[in-house]
Every structure is written in structure tokens, then in C-alpha cells.
Image: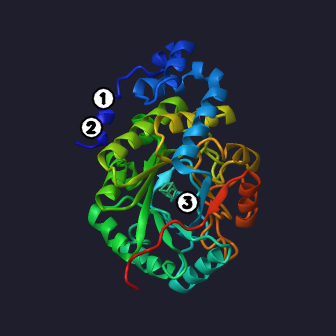
Amino acid sequence: MSFYDILQTWEAFPFQLRLQGYREVDVQRALGKPKLDAEDLLALLSPAAGNHLEEMAQRARRITQSQFGNVIQLFTPMYVSDYCVNHCEYCSFSSIYDFPRKKLDMQEVDREAAAIAATGIRHILLLTGESRKDSPVEYLRDCVKVLRKHFASIGIEVNPMSVSEYQELGTAGVDSLTVFQEVYHRETYANLHVKGPKRNYRNRLEAPERGCEAGYRSVNIGALLGLYDWRREAFIAAMHADYLQTRYPGCEISLSIPRFRPYLGDFQPDSEVTDRALVQVLLAYRLFLPRAGITLSSREPARLRDKLVHLGVTKMSAGVSTAVGGHSQEGGTPQFEISDERSVSEIREMLYRNGLQPVFKDWDILVPN
Ligand code: SF4
């Protein structure tokens, strides 16, 4: 039994019909409950809840303060390879694009890590394109050994792996895993993932569980909002997080709320995700999953990030480049355009201005050198 089996039970569910059917009274009922169920989550993602964002925001703020205090954890993604064997319609690293690919050697990894660490960042997210040939476990393990000199916490966002591979990287020093399903709607998933092993929907869907099985302290999932109807996608992503929280209570489960961003190609997603829609997703997540971490990335503009810091967010990226070696080298090709280009110190000051404490380190790697 995995989340794949649970997802089957939702496949035929008439989301559009049900979402349109919720009324104010259903939203009020959900807002009045101490613990929300799937029905309440749907009500909070429905069009009717769009008129109740202020009430949802007040409750989300209270929950966030009581569960997490006035803190936001900061991290930076670090890209070490843009080689990828997949063709995903929404990504510059897709194998169909012809640009000079880069993969950092260990000296370059060290320089890139030092440049990021100099900004104060201590939590790093190691990213690659997905290619077992170009960024195999051995390469990632070597990267992690170098990163341990600079950082207190190391996460990975790489191709899905087996439990034993995740454990191998855990032994090297990795403590958290990020795997986005990108889009939970199966037909859309098949259409947007044109070529490569990423077409294996189930293998990707079950990767977060394998990370939990491997003993990672933190696992982060999400849907790339805009690739399919955002209300349905947000609902399934939250149910996925709920499943992981229940099944793996020792693992901190987080959700990201990324929106589609411009990239090398000209694909445009079907489903528009307005700022209000993004806020509604964030608030619904916080109310449904009070203990879950929620990550807000630099895909979002500074003005919006500044407004959302009180409403459920627990982690933010800062000082971001989505190009390989982007902190220490010129000439990399970004995976996608970011929106908030502020430095780590600018984000830190913004949080202080908002009465929040930026957290650079809340963990330390406990593996022998
Ligand atoms: S989204 Fe990931 S797997 Fe898909 S093309 Fe980009 S880097 Fe490769």
C-alpha cells in the first residue's frame, strides 16, 4: 500500500462538480473546526472560499505562530549539473535544448559552496538535472562530502532513487529530500513528460515515501501549480502530504507552492494561477496541515513574498541562481527565470522588518568526516 493506491480512489472523483457546489456555509463550517478533513480541504480550495481569504489568513497566522513561532528558515539551491535525459515541456534543462551543458568538478563544487556559505547560508539544497549517467550516486556522494565542509544541513533534489541509494547519500550527510510530482493529473503528466525515465509516474510518486523509509528527517513535495487545474492539484498534493505525515510521523513533511515560470521554451500552461489563487492554496495548506513546513521560493515576486511571510510560510529561498555554478561562475543556463532576485542579506533584513527571525541553522550533520 502506498499513496499510489490511495490516489486511485480519487481518479474518478468529480472535482469540478464538487468544488463548484460548495457554499459559504461549507467554508464557515471548515473554518470552525479544530481539525480539518478532506471535505473541509476541498471547501477551502473551492471558489466559495475565495470570499473568505481574510478569515483564512487570520487563522493561518495564528496556527503558524503557535506551531513554528516567528521564524523563517532560509536556504539556497545549488545546481551542480544541468545534464538531463528527460524532456519535460516546462524546463530549460530538457534534453531537447541545445546549450553548453555544465557539470561541476569537486574543486568547482567547493568554490560554489564557499561563495554561498559566505552569504551566511547553512542549509543547502543540492540540485542536478536528471541523468544517472552524468550525476550518478557516486558523484552526488562526492559533492555531499565537499558540501559538509560548508553547510549544517544538506538536501537533495535529484532523480528519484531507491531506498538504499537514499540511505547511501544519507550516510554521506544528506538529511532531506525534495521531490515534486510536478503534476498529479495522470493524463497531463503523460503529455508534459515527453521522453525519459521521468515518464514513470508511479516511480516518481513513491520517491518521497522511499526518502521517508531511508530515514531522512525532512521530505518536501509539491505540484508545479499551473500545469493542471490548481484546485485539484493542490488538493491531491495536500492529501499526499497528509498521507506521508500519518505514515511517517518521525519525518518532517513540507509542501512547496511553486508556480510555472518562463524558461528557454515557449510552452504555456493551461491553468492560470493568480496571486489570489496562490494565497488560497497557501492558506488551505496551513489550515489543513498545521504541522507541515511550507516553502515559498524565489519564483514569486518580492512584493508577494513580503506579504506572505506571516501566513503559513516556514521556509524561503534566498540569494538564488538556477544555473549550474551560478554563484561562482559566469555563463550557466538558468533552469527557469526567478522573480525575487534579492540577496540573502536583503531577505534577512526584510524578515527583521516584518518582526520575524531568519533561521540559518537548526540542524547539524552528525556523520564522521
Ligand atoms: S524538470 Fe527536471 S527532469 Fe525535467 S527536464 Fe528539467 S531537470 Fe530534467
Is the residue under label 1 in contact with that under label 2 (CB below 8 Å)? Answer: yes
Q: Position of residue 235 (x, y in %)?
A: 46, 33
Q: Which mark is residue 93?
A: 3
N-term-proximal mark, 1 vs 3: 1
Say if 357 sits above or below 61 in the image: below
Disc 2 beta carbon < 8 A from ligand 1?
A: no
Mark 2: which amino acid? Asp
Q: Position of residue 296 (x, y in %)?
A: 60, 50
Q: Which residue is mark 2?
A: 5
Q: Which residue is mark 1?
A: 9
Please give left or right for residue 360 compared with residue 38 in the image: right
Please give left or right for residue 167 compared with residue 300 in the image: left
From this viewpoint, which residue is outermost toward the left? 1
The reply to whether residue 257 is in sight is no
Residue 98 position by quadrant: bottom right
Mark 1 neighbour density, 10 Å: few (under 14) some (14–19) many (20 or more) = few
